Amino acid sequence: MSKNDKGLPADYLHYPHRSYGMDHDRYSWSMLQNRQPVKWPNAASLAIWVNVAVQYFPLDQQGIPFKVPGGMTMPYPDLRHYSLRDYGNRVGIFRFLEAFDKYGITPTFALNTRLAQRTPYLMDILKERGNEILCHGYHMDALHYSGQDIVVEDALVERALNELRELSGQAVTGWLSPARNESENTPDILVKHNIDYFCDWVNDDMPYHYNTDSKSLIAMPLSNELEDRFVIINNQHSEQSWSEQVCDACDFLLEEAKTQGGRILGINIHPWLLGQPHRIKYLEDTLAHIMDKPGVWSASASEIMQSWDQQNPR
Amino acid sequence: MREDPEFYDYWPYHNRPKITWPNGARVAFWVAPNIEYYELNPPNNPYRQAWPQASPAVAGYSIRDYGNRVGHSRQMNLLDKYGIRGSISLSTALCDHHPEIIAACRERDWEFFSHGIYNTRYTYGMSGEQERSMIRDSMLSIHKHTGQKCAGYLAPALSHSEQTLDLFAEVGTELFGDQAAFYTCDLFHDDQPTPIKLRSEKKFVSVPYSLEMNDTIAFAVNKIEPRRYGEQLKRNFDRLYQEGAQSGTIMCIPTHNYQVSCPHRLKAFEEALEYITGHSDVWVTTGKEIASYFIDKYYETVLADISAKKGNNHE
């Protein structure tokens, strides 16, 4: 930068939040290593939370305020991306279900409400299984974002939750925003609509209390950087490398749990990606590696959240 | 604007005078954890945006917070295990926000050097006075919270002006004389220290910090696999160790607690640390110790050699 005698506005060198803790009041500052150790049921060391993102990407994507990662990229009609994402809900997910049953995994399904509306057959199967369903927003193009009208966002959340609760027959108390994007109001709106926990923030490996304008939410740790989409599409790593990364994380957390109490391995996966014939083996190998370890506990997001909640009163 | 930053002359890696590190070591090895604070909603800088979207930038902000909440202790445990003292590139506002981290590093006699106030406040567009004031604030913060006289600088988010190194050196002299502000990590042109030309003519040195071994560059820019990063660290060491028999080299691993301390990356990192510290003739040290040693023993010799090689190869 060339010499600039005028410089920046004076407030660029003012630091109004420069004091103990965070620079906002959404949660308090605390270091994981200094917290009271958590105990999982049956003296397990590592809770395994397999979260399946079951998504619907509309062909008529609006892209407001941005094109969702994984969504349409070509001029309308982008048949390649529409149908390739659809593949996950028709084919890939059935490979997932088989793998979960084979390796004793209790999955949690993060559903776009629009998909639940469009695929009653799949909904019946998921309901029959009885696994937990959490809300992944209305659909992948219904983003929550800074500057969004609060009334509009409130109506979007209400619609997504009401309709998913009706279709699933479950209370649906968990939330994952499409693209994990939020407005400044999202957490406050979620609480208002009886959400207990959400999974957008990736600042911890354990749950913590997240403040809203009414009662607090629980932030659940669902790693973004271990996601199949992040590793395989964003980073362009091989599916074998994805598997190695998850297995390395599993081994590391098991080791850490020996001295620091229960840990969580949150794995967010997409049927349209790992459900492909050339990738499913790597999911299976990964689940086999994990479930073979003594001290693992495969559980739903809510079960893990509730166990933690009982030990960490607000 | 200038064609060349004019900090140093061309100094070929060829027939250089021999550098020997303490106890005959071949490689000076240091680890530089960046301990940073990123703001959720920083003021706008006209030249560079802090986040890709308007606040809250949930993904970007929260993973960086992860580094402090979760990652720091993990990396510190690992460095303890292999007898490494970190040289911290510090967002100095973190002294106020997270004093627990500062206390743990002080206890271990780690080095603190300045990485600005916040990693979301860029040097771009600042007047000279503003940059001077920001640098002074950061050095005073380090002194107040750790008692250390800040020796090194890495500009916040690697955002520079033409005057950055001059200002840093001058502010350090004003505050603490020659005991402060005598090295920089901002330049990536060599595997050995280089004397830097400043307007004050202060003895000042560039200590190799390595952009390529930086975990953020490896994982977020080059997007390499964790195990490949571990391999790169070992191969980087192997060659510097081999060449260090001729003349001492420097290996630095710049890290971030939100990158290398994630559970899926620590194993490969640990294997590399174990490998490197398992060799004899490695000086496991800090940035400041390297800079001081070089200034005391080799500064003049190297200056003379650089001067002799300014023209043709006369051999």
Image (cartoon, coloured by chain):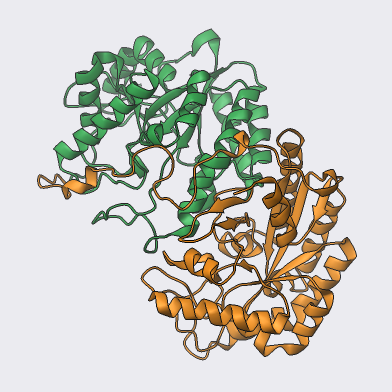
Above or below for B172 versus B153: above
Percent position (x, y) of residue A234?
56, 63
Above or below for A37 versus B207: below
| Viewer-side residue, A15 vs B169 | A15
Q: Is residue A68 left or right of residue A53?
A: left
| Viewer-side residue, A23 vs A53 | A23
Q: Is residue A169 visible?
A: yes
Q: In the rendered picture of this protein, how many numbered marks are placed on residues? A: 0
Residue in the picture at 42% in, 60% down: B56
The colour with which the image depicts chain A is orange
Q: Is residue A64 visible?
A: no
The chain coloured green is B
Residue in the picture at 56% in, 51% down: A209
Q: Is residue A254 left or right of residue B63?
A: right
Percent position (x, y) of residue B48?
30, 55
Above or below for A206 versus B199: below
Percent position (x, y) of residue B249?
49, 23
Q: Dividing the picture into quarters, in which one does residue A223 lie?
A: bottom right
User: The C terminus of chain B lies in which quarter of the figure?
Assistant: top left
Percent position (x, y) of residue A156?
50, 80
